[in-house]
Amino acid sequence: MGTGCTRVVERVCASVGMLSEAPPRFEPSLDVSGCGVLWGLPALLANGLLRHASSCFRLPAGFYGLPQIFILLGLMALARIRTMEQLRYCPPGEWGALMGLDRIPEVRTLREKVKIVAQAEPVGTWGAALSQDWMAADPELVGVLYVDGHARPYFGSQTALPRHYMPRERLCLRGTIDYWVNDQRGRPFFVVSTPFSDGLLARLREDIVPRLLKEVPGQPSQAQLDADPHLCRFTLVFDREGYSPDFFKQMWALRIACQTYHKYPKGDWAPHEFQSYEIRMPGGQTVTMMLAERGTRLSNGMWVREVRKLTSTGHQISVISTDYYAPLTAIALHMFARWSQENYFKYMMQEFGIDRLVDYETVKPDETKTVVNPDYRKLEGEIKRAAGILSRKRAQFAATALETAPGSQDSAALQQYQSVPADLVEEIQRLEHELDELKAKRKQTGKHIAFKDLPEAEKFRVLAPTRKRFMDTIKMIAYRAETALADMLREHLTHPDEARALLREVFTADADLLPDEKTGTLTVSLHHLANPLSDRALRSLAIQLNESNTIYPGTQLRLVFKLVSDDNP
């Protein structure tokens, strides 16, 4: 039966198909290791952990049912158990106690359950349904959506994925690109993954924008759009990678506004154009910015709004937007709050392990996808090599020549200097000719080709995306749940930025688990933390959690939260 198994009869019945699912049954337990993570269960449920699960997924009859697997995965994310393998080092009986079971499943069993659940169609349906629910819950924030790519390296040997530039390592490494869609506060809605290097604009056109047009709530009707030529459906905010006047024009044809940094601003504006504005950021802090605005015509003739921020050093940061109705301060707020998404990436890597490999399965990619032409990449490397050698030879010539006319670095002008060795002049002429030939050849070579046209030696298999997408959805739910709890805590803390750190401490703290069938309650009595200030904040959090009247799934027991010394919940 395994370590910690006490419900023997039910396990035997489940093994012969006589039990569809073991019901949670709680027993009084003191000093349960890590039981504080149950303080996050109401937020997990409120953010959709079990919502739509029964209609999207199916599990065969067994001891562990679908709700228990989902609850376990959600609690693992909050407790910072980043992979299923790390469960090997967690006490199975202690974790079983906080789930109403004798023990949690072994890693092998959990992997098999996730493999059964994580099929492409139900995972996609579930993720889309949750995304729509999250958008509908905050319609004001959905009007401005942030899109950015996160490079996820792959160090395995199962397949030779294409190389991408990884900003964190400043190297080109094999891996995939995840394109995340978040709100102003960094909370995620969904993610689109691809191993192909076709860029942000391709993913926006093919995957993200069509989905947003279907899922974003509160969009203006077609009659409203026809009546007001400057009204937009919603606004997309992204970094300089998405700068493209043609793309802005295509999006405005769909009445979608775009906002990004201006890639080619023209000169500095006069300092007297800038005025001081106080802007309240999504985190609640107020900042002062020096802002100015003009209308700007892009290279394709499209008129856009250009907003500039004057920094304390005199540098001007240029932002362009096709949102023609948002106030000047809102444009600045939307652009400079983009760092919430960068902070989200960093936090999710450190705390939730979104870069971790979920499984080793590989699948055949879509052969219609475009990839970088290997011949083009090879020519790029040869051009960079030749240009580097030519630059060094010219520098050597400049150091050797006694006199140099300004700007005379062409091969014809080099011959007039008798002090320069003839072989150096010939080498520079040869390199110039070689560089011109390579550039002409590159111009005739297509940068991208279809995957099916790749040479066999260059073809690759891609990492199976479904299980990773399923686990990313669980982690998104956990992040949103932690964010909701942090918002409850901040007003009770001297340092609001410490809310998440306090929650991480709670999620790993010990607690007493006391069920009471007569009153229909399940009390989670958390042990005291390091200082009275933390205890005081948690008492306030407990009041709000108790007001939610959360029922533990599969039971009739209402969750009650308190500290061990508090007689009254």
Image: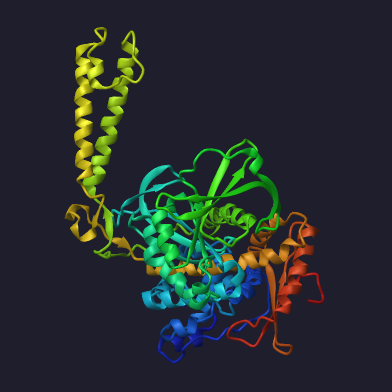
Nearest the camera: 36 or 539? 539
Q: Is residue 363 left or right of residue 114?
A: left
**Residue 381, position as x, y percentages in the image:** 27, 38
Q: Is residue 491 left or right of residue 91?
A: right
Q: Outermost residue toward the bottom?
A: 18
**Residue 3, position as x, y percentages in the image:** 51, 72
Q: Can residue 564 be seen by looking at this rendering?
A: yes
Nearest the camera: 361 or 64? 361
**Residue 564, position as x, y percentages in the image:** 76, 70
Q: Is residue 145 above or below residue 310?
A: below
Q: Is residue 491 above or below residue 395?
A: below
Numbered marks: total: 0
Nearest the camera: 397 or 458? 397
Q: Can residue 91 be seen by looking at this rendering?
A: no
Q: Is residue 275 above or below residue 221?
A: above
Give the position of the C terminus as an image quadrant.
bottom right
Colour scheme in use = rainbow
Nearest the camera: 67 or 4? 67
- Residue drawn at (34%, 9%), measured in percent from left and top? 403
**Residue 305, position as x, y percentages in the image:** 54, 54
Q: Outermost residue toward the right?
A: 567
- Residue drawn at (26%, 35%), measured in percent from left and top? 383
